[in-house]
Image (cartoon, rainbow, N blue to C red):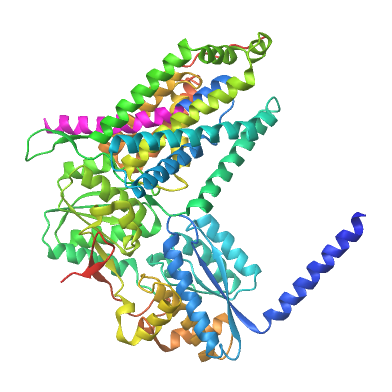
Amino acid sequence: MRTPVKKLVSAVATSIAVMGAGQAAAEIKIGIAGPMTGPVAQYGDMQFSGASMAIEQINANGGVMGEKLVGVEQDDVCDPKQAVTVANNMVNEGVRFVVGHLCSSSTQPASDIYEDEGILMVTPASTSPDITERGYELVFRTIGLDSMQGPVAANYLISQKPERVAVVHDKQQYGEGIATAVRDTLEEGGVEVAMFEGITAGAKDFSSLVTKLRQADVDYVYYGGYHPELGLILRQAQQADLDATFMGPEGVGNKDINTIAGDAAEGLLVTLPPSFDEKDENQELVQAFEEKGEDPSGPFVLTSYTAVQLIADGIEAAESTDPFDVAEALRAGTFQTPIGTVEYDGKGDMESFEFVVYEWHSDGSKTPVN
Amino acid sequence: MQDLLYFIQQLINGLTIGSTYALIAIGYTMVYGIIGMINFAHGEIYMIGAYTALIAITGLAALGIAWLPLILIVALVCAMIVSSSMGWAVERVAYRPVRGKHRLIPLISAIGMSIFLQNYVHLAQGSRNIGFPALIEGGFRFGAEDSFQTSISYMQVTIFVTTLVCMTILSLFISRSRIGRACRAVSQDLGMANLLGIDTNRIISATFVIGAALAAVAGLLLGMYYGSIDPLFGFIAGLKAFTAAVLGGIGSIPGAMLGGLILGVAESMTSGYLSGEYKDVVSFGLLILILLFKPTGLLGKPEVEKI
């Protein structure tokens, strides 16, 4: 009895595999890798929503070189180990272009695999400078670097003439990288950094840290990391009457910080990419998102959209779907995108990318400072 | 003076967090005391307690009830009921069928249970951090107006007092009540207790239920204290509480209390005087030292081989 069933199963499996292979010939797979679950899943939502919109619109306009784009979405949970698994899955799926990953600490190990396997990667969110420092040919981004964002934050702080500033980070590649950039710029600007300290990502109790900040009597606290921890720090600082202004990078600029911190989020300073969704030339696109019931205002929605668009433009410019040809075309060309004109330097970083200081409000809105 | 106030502040921070470690540690230590197993799903029970409390609080708020004591009591009772049933179910599903088998088997089934519960909450509640309303606000402060002040929030006082009350009730329950006496008998010798007519299955279920109920109390308190919960937060709290249980002597209830407080204070002193980066290094370093030099823990009794 058992053998016929097995045969049937394997026959079905083979035919599915053949069908799959048949389809693959007429389409270009775009891998989208980012966190669908886990503490920073809301940034992943921005990424998936932006990238899917770009794929839809490109397909509606006839695809790329007559072929349709197909999104292959995978969840890396913002976990470096899971990111490696996802990267290997992408290889097995036959994906040759990836939009992702989101967290720098995931992008870094995944990019090793993509580079080895000849897969072109465009990260719409990872800002760690290390990612493009390794001389990889196939790594690009549609976002600025911590080394640009940190100084913007630090220069703003210097302009406020604080007496003492504390810099805290979450010991992760993104948070610590940006915190280090902030500390260095502050010290160059002659501001006393009273404290430079790491916390553990995922921790809940910051009472000791808050006590220490009160003891250090600082005017400003810069936090390098993501919103779940900063939200708790803000809330616990408010309860302990810590009288200091907090500032963070775009990783904290998320409406979820309001559900955690409540009123304590009022007055938080955040460096963010400029609001691309408020630009006049993007209004048509913004409307398309709104019709789908999605919010285009997140910092990574349009950078993800742009990542897909650049891959498509690169393929057309190179007239080839070979990732190495596309990479060459991306480095050579100038592209008009929703995040502005994009030109790449030799490392895969954009020639220029702007960050703006915003003041965050307890209702989740933000206003530009100065 | 200012240094002293700072020290006191860190001590209070540590005692607060330590007493909640102790509440969770009870669950580990009681189960270990009775069946000699570590219940790795206990951290998840605590997390589910916090979620249940939040659901109850949100529900009451939706009904327009704003009287604080009522909200707290309803949330506490709901969390304790749901967590206790979870504790009971975990024992029935993951422990009873494999009891008496090789020691590793229940261990692995407990880890499986823990992964299952975590992912269940991920699916049911989403993976985002959910804000927990701060129901108890305000506090006392000491020290000069213009320098460092020691502040004790009412929430910290609530946590400390609730823990003390729970521990006292538990100690009385174990030493005075019928089930408590049976618990002690089962922990001394399960087979013999069975022969003497104690329904050991019921007693083992009872220890899981009691441990889970205390974990639910901790879930509600810590949810309010920290201000946000997520499906993974039971894991690290579970590890810490487990460390506290081992530190104090696993199987010993006063040991769990002592271990929790020591661990909490050690952590807060480390982040207060060294750096927050070394907090976990110190707590798990303590675990290693204890396991090396006094494997039975501070208040644990040396294991006597039963022949």
Q: Is residue B16 magenta?
A: yes
Asked which quadrant contains residue A298, the reply is: bottom left
The location of residue B13, given as percent across then percent down, is 27, 34
In this rendering, position of residue A43 left or right of residue B68: right
Residue at 39%, 21% (x, y): give it.
B167
Residue A313 position, x and y percent, is 49, 87
Principal secondary structure, stretch drawn in magenta: helix
Q: Is residue B261 above or below residue B196?
A: below
Q: Quadrant of residue A183?
A: bottom left
Residues shaded magenta = B1-25
Give the side of residue A131 with respect to residue A157, left or right. Answer: right
Relative side of B77 to A274, left or right: right
Q: Which quarter of the image is occupied by the C terminus of chain A?
A: bottom left
Locate residue A22, reporting x and y percent.
73, 80
Q: Residue at x 40, y 32 (%)?
A: B217
Q: From the image, which quarter does the N terminus of chain A lie in?
A: bottom right
x, y (%) of residue A224? 31, 57
- A100 to the left or right of A339: right
| Res A145 quadrant in image | bottom left
Query: Image height check: is B40 above or below B119?
Result: above
With respect to residue B16, does A351 lie above or below? below
**Nearer to me, A230 or B89:** B89
